[in-house]
């Protein structure tokens, strides 16, 4: 079996589902392209990490005063 070639794993892109080869040369892993990678980052930032009208510094100082 000297001609056996191990195939690299193929994974679906989390953003669009396009199958891509999991290769160390692919810098967009696990995404298929820079566009999908950016789309995912934007969705992530918009979903859970926006705190409207509440600056982080205010939350921190209130917390410190209450616990001291
Ligand atoms: Zn994709």
Image (cartoon, rainbow, N blue to C red):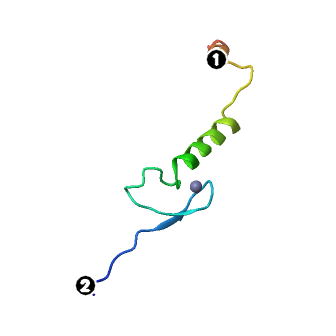
Whole-Å distance between the Cαs marked 1 and 2? Answer: 68 Å
| Residue 13 in which image quadrant | bottom right
Task: Label 2, secondary structure: give it.
Answer: loop
Would you say residue 48 is visible in this rendering?
Answer: no
The label number, if any, that marks residue 42 in the structure image: none
Query: Which residue is the site of mark 2?
Result: 2
Would you say residue 57 is visible in this rendering?
Answer: yes
Locate residue 65 relative to residue 21 in the image: left or right: right
Query: Which residue is the site of mark 1?
Result: 67
| Residue 38 in which image quadrant | top right
**Image spot of residue 68 (x, y percent):** 61, 13
Using the image, determine if residue 46 lies above or below residue 13: above
Check mark 2 vs ligand 1: CB closer than 8 Å? yes or no.
no
The quarter of the picture showing ligand 1: bottom right
Using the image, determine if residue 4 lies above or below residue 28: below
Which numbered disc, 1 or 2, marks the residue closer to the eye? 2
CB-based contact (under 8 Å), mark 1 and mark 2:
no
Check mark 1 vs ligand 1: CB closer than 8 Å? yes or no.
no
**Image spot of residue 30 (x, y percent):** 51, 55
Name the residue at the left extreme.
Answer: 2
The residue nearer to you, when weighing 19 against 65, is 19
The residue nearer to you, when weighing 5 against 56, is 5
| Residue 49 in which image quadrant | top right
- Is tag 1's residue or tag 2's residue first in the polypeptide sequence? 2
**Image spot of residue 40 (x, y percent):** 61, 45
Tell me which residue sits at (42%, 55%) in the image: 26
Tell me which residue sits at (52%, 56%) in the image: 32
**Image spot of residue 28 (x, y percent):** 47, 50
Tell me which residue sits at (74%, 19%) in the image: 53
């Amino acid at each position: 079996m000297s001609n056996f070639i191990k195939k690299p794993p193929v994974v679906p892109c989390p953003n669009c589902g396009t199958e891509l080869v999991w290769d160390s040369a692919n810098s967009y892993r696990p995404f298929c392209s820079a566009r999908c990678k950016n789309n995912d980052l934007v969705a992530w930032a918009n979903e859970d990490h926006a705190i409207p009208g509440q600056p982080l510094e205010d939350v921190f100082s209130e917390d410190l005063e209450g616990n001291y």
